[in-house]
Image (spheres, grey):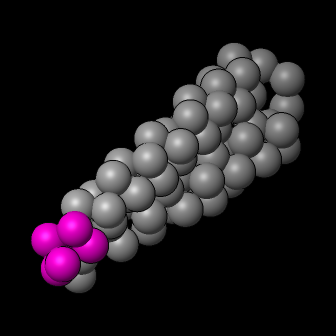
Amino acid sequence: MKLSTLLYTLGFASIVMSAINFVEGKQVPEGEKKNDKQHDGNFIGHWAPTFFILGKVVEDREHRKQM
């Protein structure tokens, strides 16, 4: 498996994990855990752009090496 594919997969996985945490936080009754889950979901959601940018950089380097 190429490194770029792994980074793109991690980007999509972080989006899914973010959505799951955020929705779980919405379903918890009022309290401390609700806010923690929602904040965790937002935090994990910020990873996706980083993984996608790194994936593109690595993909460009992989393509350049093949030339």
The boundaries of the magenta stretch are 62-67
Residue drawn at 62 percent across, 59 percent down: 16
Q: Is residue 4 left or right of residue 14?
A: left
Residue drawn at 45 percent across, 41 percent down: 50
Note whether 46 is above or below 8 in the view shown.
above
Q: Could you say which quadrant of the image residue 31 lies in?
A: top right
Q: Could you say which quadrant of the image residue 55 lies in?
A: bottom left
Which quadrant is the N terminus positioned in? Answer: bottom left
Which quadrant is the C terminus positioned in? Answer: bottom left
Q: Is residue 59 left or right of residue 46?
A: left
Say if the magenta span includes residue 66: yes
Residue drawn at 61 percent across, 53 percent down: 15
Q: Position of residue 52 (x, y in %)?
A: 47, 53
Say if the magenta span includes residue 29: no
Q: Position of residue 41 (x, y in %)?
A: 63, 37
Question: In this rendering, does residue 24 appear at all?
Answer: no
Note whether 18 is above or below 26 in the view shown.
below
In the image, 29 versus 25, the foreground residue is 25
Prevailing secondary structure of the magenta residues = helix
